[in-house]
Amino acid sequence: MEVNKFEDVFEGKLAKNEMVEPKDWMPDNYRKHLIRQISQHAHSEIVGMLPEGNWITRAPSLRSKVVLLAKVQDEGGHGLYLYTAAETLGISRDELLDNLHTGKAKYSSIFNYPTLTWADIGAVGWLVDGAAIMNQVMLQRTSYGPYARAMVRICKEESFHQRQGFEIMTRLAFGTEDQKAMAQDALNRWWYPTMMMFGPPDAESPNSENAMKWRIKRETNDQLRQRFVDQTVPQVQYLGLTVPDANLKWNEAKKGYDFSEPNWVEFKNVISGNGPCNKERLAARNKAHNDGAWVREAAQAFAKKRNEIYVAA
Amino acid sequence: MSDNQGPVWEIFLQKKAGQPFVHCGSLHAFDKEMALQNARDLYTRRNEGVSIWAVPSNAIVASSPEDIGPFFEPANDKVYRHPTFYQIPDAIGHM
Ligand SMILES: [Fe+2]
Ligand SMILES: [Fe+2]
């Protein structure tokens, strides 16, 4: 078949809402876009374990400790599902990890903010996982099969993440004055960084057009952000807390809230390495990887000794 | 850069005894034992299965998408392979 025939088959699949599978022909740019997006997503799951892992040893009760531990373990699993999805596109795990460790690959800007109090663990589960879920629910129908299937599994597991975060917020918001203040402080600090998770405004989002055309994304950054605000504001009201946005107002005409944009200059700064925790996060990942080198070497030697060598596929 | 993550394995889960094994994803592991343990940790944290198959990825032989036509079409015109092709007299009822 000639290239344009292949292209017709590919376009035909997209038009019929069929999924593209690893062995199918796909345009180079589609493959590149997917590798970038899926690996960024995987890195975000892995780096995202750090701000929450920070509180495992200091969780206020045994119950909250096992819950947080289970959640962080899930995030590690999500990273692994996504790495293997990216690998079906012809990039090796080593290369993916190397791109993270050298700072060549990006991960979600949100994980470069610190978790200062226990309330932050509530805010992260409630807001950050909430925003991630909104994006991931859409991605269950993304056009690349392995990515979509990873998302279905991830979404099933995510449903408790947001609930456990909201439960922490509830305890604090209905607790003592100090606890309520702590909850409000966490909301104040996480609100805008969470809004940034959906990416730049549609008009300034360089990758959005292709992502929509190829049905990798099905909704735009601004659509998802609007839905997130509309969904979250009633939850803030329930908690008796205040959204840190003086411009937040119900707009009857659009049946949604008007709200302030996050600070996009800050977003660009954080993305390009200058957020409050970028260096710390990368250093932690590099250390974990290097400290684990002997385990990989030992496992390899052991497999060799037992004559059980499988060639890397 | 050396690949030191170990080879890729495809993981199949059986949800309940008696049911077929279904592919659920892949992972890296250096040997059979590690493949099974990793699969347990990665794919059955919520009782998703009672039994696991781990198969080295490169042991799998797959049909290729370009061959869909020549490979599967021969089955299309063989309606006589289905029970609906045959007429059973009303007097017989269910068969
Ligand atoms: Fe996750
Ligand atoms: Fe999560």
Image (cartoon, coloured by chain):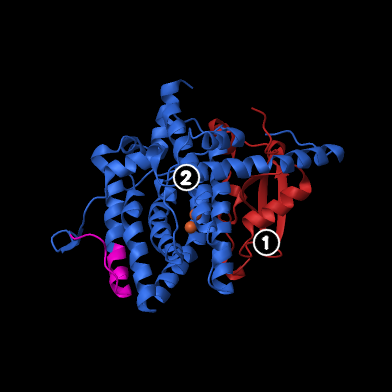
Tell me the shade of chain A: blue
**Residue A296, relative to residue A117: is it above or below?**
above
Q: Which label sits on residue B19? A: 1
Horizontal side of A237 relative to A16 (left or right) equals left
x and y, in percent, of residue A174 in the image:
37, 78
Q: Which label sits on residue A112? A: none
At x 69%, y 52%, the residue is B38
x and y, in percent, of residue B63 in the image:
62, 35
Residue A233 belongs to the span the image colors magenta: yes
x and y, in percent, of residue A279 in the image:
48, 41
Can residue A60 be seen in the rendering of this structure?
Answer: yes
Horizontal side of A63 relative to A13 (left or right) equals right
Chain corresponding to red in the figure: B
Residue A59 belongs to the span the image colors magenta: no
The reply to whether label 2 and label 1 mark residues of one chain is no
Question: In terms of image quadrants, where is residue B65?
Answer: top right
Q: Of the residues shown, which amino acid type is indicated by label 1?
A: Gln
x and y, in percent, of residue A147 in the image:
49, 45
Horizontal side of A149 relative to A198 (left or right) equals right
- Say which of A149 and A188 sits in front: A188
Q: Chain of mark 1?
A: B
Judge the density around disc 2: few (<14), some (14-19), many (≥20) Cα neighbours within 10 Å: some
Q: Which label sits on residue A41? A: 2
**Residue A15, relative to residue B24: is it above or below?**
above
**What is the magenta range?**
A231-246
At x 43%, y 32%, the residue is A30
**Residue A263, relative to residue A178: is it above or below?**
above
- Say which of A246 and B62 sits in front: A246
